[in-house]
Image: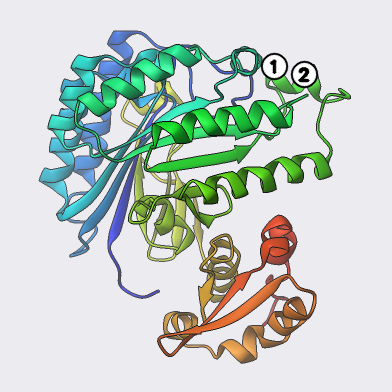
């Protein structure tokens, strides 16, 4: 791939309690375990010093779990280690997820002082019954207090995470949540459709329930939400992500553009020089010093081209033919011309020219059927 900046991801696997829908690698833990984990994180990060070559780091993302369970001092220590081991660009985007039920003004001020510039608040809904169904530890009022504190602490780049397609969710409920959130004017809003994951409480309760929305009902809610957000000045730049001008999430865009990233912490997945690998998912092994990459996969040219297409076509901007050819030294028309024309004829893709370059992107229907579109770009072995 084309030489580019590097991104870093730091996984904080702790939470107050598991939400009813969550199958992420996270669990409650006490202060001593969290401190031991932070120390081990810093050791793992230090192990990578000098291994990324000259690549500057343009994005750092703390995800979880609940990163806001860390103290300001712990967050500062991790970021200081990153700065000592990598070269951050002057405008590096440093993002941090937080649960409204874990936030204090003191920590917010310390996070800001440590260098965190973008926060992502996991609201999910402004409806109390929906928050209860999801097993969230906060209510709507707690979110509003968290949001106000974040503004007072000086954060000017805030994302709010929302969830739709909940069992029995009504159009009026989602519209009310969207109105209340957009009235606050956060810079970015993420809106994800609920996926029932096996072995979660929500799955056990609703897997066979008639309260589950049909695909048609879910799509109707989604289209309503997209229209409401666009009307409020939030540009859709990816299937589930909306932002005001100038506030697209750089880290997420990097994933969709296949930019290299190194990840730290248990279960963390990395992608560097066309190799993917995961860290151990065992907390006890990690705390014992097991940082060795596992499940390494060396991507073939075929793998890389497929990823370029199905990740890039999640974005409303789509993919650039010239970038494809520069990255892979392959002719786009030879590799994907036929399938592109077929999907255009079906009304799922569209083409445009900008600045002398040629782009392919999904239509509205194509975004709705994005898995089908992406699957069409899988190549036969030997291609």
Q: Residue 204 shows which numbered tag? A: 2
Left or right: 151, with 124 as reference point: left
Tell which of 89 and 188 is nearer to you: 188
Residue at 60% over, 64% down: 310
Tell which of 118 and 34 is nearer to you: 118
**In the image, residue 266 lies at what x, y percent?**
41, 32
Q: Secondary structure at mark 2?
A: helix
Residue 145 makes an appearance in the image? yes
**Quadrant of the rendered image containing residue 148:** top left
Residue 74 makes an appearance in the image? no
Q: Are marks 2 and 1 in contact (CB under 8 Å)?
A: yes
Residue at 36% over, 14% down: 102
Give the quarter of the figure containing the N terminus: bottom left
Left or right: 229, with 251 as reference point: right
Residue at 39% over, 50% down: 244
- How many residues crowd around disc 1 within 10 Å: few (fewer than 14), some, or many (20 or more)? many
Residue at 70% over, 23% down: 199
Q: Residue 7 shows which numbered tag? A: none
**In the image, residue 228 lies at what x, y percent?**
58, 44
Give the quarter of the figure containing the C terminus: bottom right
Tell which of 279 and 84 is nearer to you: 84
**In the image, residue 297 lies at what x, y percent?**
51, 57
Using the image, determine if residue 52 lies above or below residue 157.
below
- How many residues crowd around disc 2 within 10 Å: few (fewer than 14), some, or many (20 or more)? some
Alpha carbon separation for disc pair 2 and 1: 5 Å
Left or right: 91, with 150 as reference point: left
**Quadrant of the rendered image containing residue 217:** top right
Tell which of 93 and 49 is nearer to you: 93
Q: Residue 201 shows which numbered tag? A: 1
Q: Secondary structure at mark 1?
A: helix
How is the protein colored in the picture? Answer: rainbow
**In the image, residue 172 lies at what x, y percent?**
69, 28
């Amino acid at each position: 791939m084309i030489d580019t900046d590097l991104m870093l991801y730091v996984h904080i696997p702790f939470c107050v309690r598991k939400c009813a829908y969550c199958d992420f690698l996270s669990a409650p833990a006490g202060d001593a375990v969290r401190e031991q984990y932070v120390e081990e994180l810093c050791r793992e990060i230090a192990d990578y010093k000098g291994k990324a070559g000259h690549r500057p780091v343009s994005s750092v993302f703390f995800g979880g779990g609940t990163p806001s369970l860390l103290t300001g001092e712990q967050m500062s220590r991790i970021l200081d280690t990153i700065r000592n081991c990598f070269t951050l660009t002057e405008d590096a985007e440093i993002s941090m997820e937080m649960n409204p039920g874990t936030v204090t003004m003191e920590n917010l001020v310390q996070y800001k002082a440590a260098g965190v510039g973008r926060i992502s608040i996991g609201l999910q809904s402004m409806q109390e019954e929906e928050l209860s169904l999801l097993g969230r530890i906060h209510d709507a009022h707690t979110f509003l207090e968290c949001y106000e504190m974040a503004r007072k602490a000086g954060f000017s780049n805030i994302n709010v995470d929302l969830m739709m397609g909940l069992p029995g969710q009504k159009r009026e409920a989602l519209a009310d949540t969207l109105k209340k959130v957009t009235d606050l004017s956060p810079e970015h809003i993420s809106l994800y459709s609920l996926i029932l994951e096996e072995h979660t409480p929500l799955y056990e309760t609703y897997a066979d329930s008639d309260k589950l929305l049909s695909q048609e009902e879910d799509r109707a809610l989604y289209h309503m939400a997209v229209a409401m957000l666009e009307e409020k000045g939030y540009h859709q730049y990816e299937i589930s992500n909306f932002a005001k001008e100038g506030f697209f999430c750089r880290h997420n865009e990097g994933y969709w553009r296949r930019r290299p990233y190194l990840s730290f912490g248990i279960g963390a997945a990395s992608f560097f020089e066309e190799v993917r690998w995961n860290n151990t998912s065992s907390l006890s092994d990690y705390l014992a010093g097991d940082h060795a990459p596992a499940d390494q996969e060396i991507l073939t040219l075929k793998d890389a081209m497929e990823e370029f297409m199905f990740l890039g076509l999640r974005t409303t901007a789509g993919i650039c033919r010239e970038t494809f050819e520069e990255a892979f030294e392959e002719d786009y028309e030879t590799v994907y011309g036929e399938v592109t024309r077929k999907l255009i004829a079906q009304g799922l893709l569209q083409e445009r020219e900008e600045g002398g370059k040629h782009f392919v992107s999904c239509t509205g229907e194509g975004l709705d059927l994005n898995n089908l579109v992406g699957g069409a770009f899988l190549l036969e072995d030997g291609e």
